[in-house]
Amino acid sequence: MTLIDPAGGDVPGTGSPDPYYGALPDPLMVDGSSTRSRLAVKDLLAEVVISLTARPARTLLTAMGTVLGVAALVATLGLARTSGNQIVSRFDELEATQVSVQPQSRGFGGDNSRQTSFIPFDADDRLGRLNGVVAAGTISDVDVGGRLARSVPVNDPLGQNEYQIPVLAASGGLFDAVRADVLTGRVFDAGHDQRGDAVAVLGPGAARRLNITQVANAPTIFVGDEALVVVGVLADVDRKPELLNAITIPNELAKDRFGLQVPAEVLIETEIGAAELIGAQAPTALHPNDPDRLRASVPPSPTRTRSAVADDLNVLFLVLGGISLIVGALGIANVTLVSVLERTSEIGLRRALGATRRHIATQFLAESAALGLLAGIIGTSLGILTVVLVSANRVWTPVLDPILPLAAPLMGVVIGLVAGTYPAWKASSLEPIAALRGAE
C-alpha cells in the first residue's frame, strides 16, 4: 500500500521514487515492519559534549559534590599512607632501633647482693662487636642509702641546700645509646669509667636543684660525703628520660663507692632493621654460658605499625569522603532529572523521528557518566595536590598508591552512572505524543 500526497505526489519518507523527495529512509515500511534505528558513537559523544557545555556553570556546580568527594578520598588515602610512612620512619628512628636486655629475674629493692651477675660491666665492648649495633651502654639504679645530694653550700638559713636526687650508674656508651644532647660541658667516657673517676653528669632537673649552671670551673657536688666533679649537664635525651632528673656516675665509681654489684639493664641502639637480629644475639654475647638467663625486649614490627596507623586514619576519613560522594551523586541525579524535564520536547521529537527508548536512556546515562568522569578527574587532581602540599609543608615524602589516580576517575564514572539511572529511565519512558504535548 502506498500513501498519496494531497498535492498529487507520494508522501515524502515512504520510499517512493518521487522526483522532488527522492528515495528517503522509511521508518514505516509498506508491510508494517520498522527499520532498525541506530545511534552512532560519535553522535552520542557529540550530544554529550553539547549537553555539558551548553551550561558550563551548572555543569561545574553539579560536579562539585563529586569533585569534593573524590578529592577527599584521594587526599585521605594519600595522607594516610604518607603520614603512616612518616610515623613509621620516626618509629624506626627511636623505638624500632632500641633493644633492651635485662636479667630474667633480679633481686628486689636496692639489695644488689641478691642479684646474680648476668650482665657484665664490659657489655659495651661485647655488644659493639655485633654487626648492626650503633651504640650500647648499661644503666642501673644506685642505692645511696638515703643520702642527700648538695652542691657547695650557700649560707642561707631559709633556703634548702640538700635534696633527694636519684643517682644512676652508667657506662660510657650509654649517652650515645640514648642520644643525649649536652647543654654544657661533656659526658664521661669509657676512660672515666675504667679509672673509676669521681665525676658526674647532671640532668637539667638535677642541675637546677643544685644550682649548677656551667662547668667551666669544675663545680663539685656531694652525695652524702662523696664528692663528685660535675663534667657536664644534659640538655635532653631521646631515650631514658629518667636521666633528665638524676645524677649519673660511672659504673666503676658506683661499684667502688656505693656497692653496685651488677648492671641492671643494657640499652642498645641498632641500625634500622637490625633490632630483631640483635635481640636474638645480644643475650648470647653478654652471657654465652647461659643466654636464657637474659631477656631482650625487641620493638614490634614497623609493618604492623604502618598498617595500624593507615587503618585508623582510613576509617576516620573515608567515612567523610563517602558522605561527600553520596551528596555528589544526589546532585548529579537531581540535575539530570531537571534536564529531563527541560528537554521533554527534545525527547519527544527524537522519539518521533525513530529514536528508541534505549537510545534515550543511553544518551542520558552517557551524559551523567561524563559528568562523573569530569568530576573524578578534577577531584583526583585536587586530592593529589593536597597530598603534595601537606607533605611539602610538613617536610614529608608524599606516598601515593599508583593505582589511585586511575581508579578515582573510574569511581566518578560509576557514581555518574548510578546517579543517572533513574533520570535515564524517566526520560526513556516518555511517549512521543505525550512528550510533544507536554512541551506545548
Image (tube, rainbow, N blue to C red):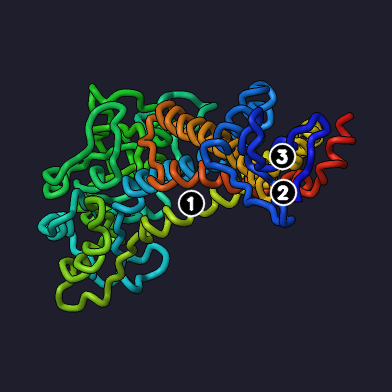
Query: SS of the residue at dot 1?
Result: helix
Of the image marks 1 and 3, the number of the one nearer the N terminus:
1
Q: Quadrant of the C terminus?
A: top right
Question: Mark 1: few, some, or many residues within 10 Å (few <14, many ≥20)?
Answer: some
In this view, the mark in front (1 or 2): 2
**On the rendered structure, is 90 left or right of 30?**
left
Q: CA distance from mark 1 to mark 2?
A: 67 Å
**On the rendered structure, is 363 left or right of 195?**
right
In this view, the mark in front (3 or 2): 2
Query: Which amino acid type corresponds to the residue marked 1 in the rendered image?
Result: Val
Q: CA distance from mark 3 to mark 2?
A: 11 Å
Query: SS of the residue at dot 3?
Result: loop
**Rendering coords of residue 127 (x, y %):** 16, 58
**Rendering coords of residue 208 (x, y %):** 42, 30
Whether pointer 1 and pointer 2 mark residues with C-beta atoms closer than 8 Å, the reply is no
Of the image marks 3 and 2, the number of the one nearer the N terminus:
2
Query: Which amino acid type corresponds to the residue marked 3 in the rendered image?
Result: Leu
**Residue that badge 2 annotates:** 28
**Residue that badge 1 annotates:** 309
Of the image marks 1 and 2, the number of the one nearer the N terminus:
2
**Residue that badge 3 annotates:** 353
**Rendering coords of residue 18 (x, y %):** 66, 34
Q: Which residue is located at x 61 percent, y 33 percent? A: 47
